[in-house]
Image (spheres, rainbow, N blue to C red):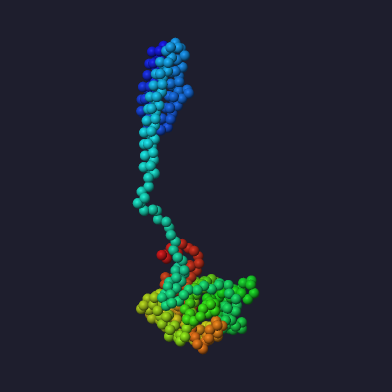
Amino acid sequence: MDLDSLRADLENLRRGALERIAAASEPAQIDQLSVDLLGKKGELTLVLRGIGGLPAEQRPKVGAIANEVRQAIEGALAERGGELRTGALGRRLQAESVDVTTPGRPIPRGSRHPIIETMAEIAEVFGQFGFVVYESPEVEDDLTNFQMLNIPPDHPARDLWDTMYVDIPEHLLRTHTSPGQIRVMHAERPPIRALLPGRCFRYEATDASHASEFFQVEGLMVDEGTSLADLRGLLDQFAHAMFGADKRTRFRPGYYPFTEPSVAFDVECLICGGRRCPACSHTGWMTILGAGMVHPVVLQYGGIDPERYQGFAFGMGAERIANLRHGVGDLRLYLENDLRFLEQFP
């Protein structure tokens, strides 16, 4: 092979290489062309193998031409590769771009359980009258749960509670929130305005209106000169806040060992408006809580002088208040964790 043939082959290689590089549309094609044209077994290497057949004085000329061709190909590869990579990056950024002003996907959020929501509403209403929320233990001793509330071991009122005892002697799962009264009176001095929400337990068969686990809200006020009229006024305000300012209320006699006198507090039937219906047993009234003046014996057990201070207490079932507010007829629905039921409450 002579010098002119090698020069022609190198020129053809450069021209063809530049056309192929210009026609490349992907960065990967540029990488492959670099190997095909300039690699150890590439097309330029194959052409240069003909140098060995030239006279020694002609070889430097061919080498110079080969360097020019290599530089031209390398420059074209670098330029076109840069263009393609820039374009690919731009397309990727465009495809993966995020509009930060676009609202995000809504995240499903739960809501408060209707019983918890009801107890919070009760606490808010009484909080406007200065009542402070306290907690008391769910596992109580017999002394605090019964005896200090004027219910000694032989008292017939114990039959009102189906008690669940635990494996600690003389301890039980509290049957009501009333023992919290004793704990508050031991911890605070009058004037006392306490609200005690919490879970209670009784050994009962579960049906539409009974459960072995339920929630109560206990209220206690102790001060000088506290009267039944104060209790009536407070409960009227509570009923109107929860069920409507137009609802009538009434006191009627009741019985609780730890209050004297004891009363049941009724509100005008929320279903028939007092016209009498099956929901109110055709009486026109619905009982929402029990209350009364704190028995002097209970005040003494609480470390408070009944000659100087008087108090009243009230207790309500949170499930019953929730039933009346939302028109629910079966308290078992609160315990089943059925989302079809719970999602109805905002």
Q: At 49% across and 81% down in the image, what residue appears?
A: 190
Q: Is residue 254 above or below residue 69?
A: below
Give me the residue at 43% from left, 75% from top: 127
The image quadrant of residue 35 is top left
Task: Examine the rendering and report whether any part of residue 329 can be seen.
Answer: no
Q: Quadrant of residue 75?
A: top left
Q: Name which quarter of the figure residue 342 lies in.
A: bottom left
The correct choice, above or below, for 209 with respect to 16 in the image is below
Number of numbered discs overlaid on the protein picture: 0
Quadrant that contains the N terminus: top left
Q: Which residue is at 38% across, 24% downward?
A: 72
Q: Nearer the viewer, residue 345 or 83?
A: 83
Name the residue nearer the viewer: 232 or 36.
36
Q: Position of residue 173 (x, y in %)?
A: 58, 73
Instruction: Check the image and report above or below for 149 versus 10.
Output: below
Above or below residue 56? Residue 206 is below
What residue is shown at x 42% (from left), y 73% (from top)? 124
Q: Residue furthest bottom?
A: 307
Q: Is residue 142 left or right of residue 275?
A: right
Which quadrant of the figure contains the C terminus? bottom left
> Which x, y percent locates residue 223?
47, 83
Q: Position of residue 184 (x, y in %)?
A: 52, 77
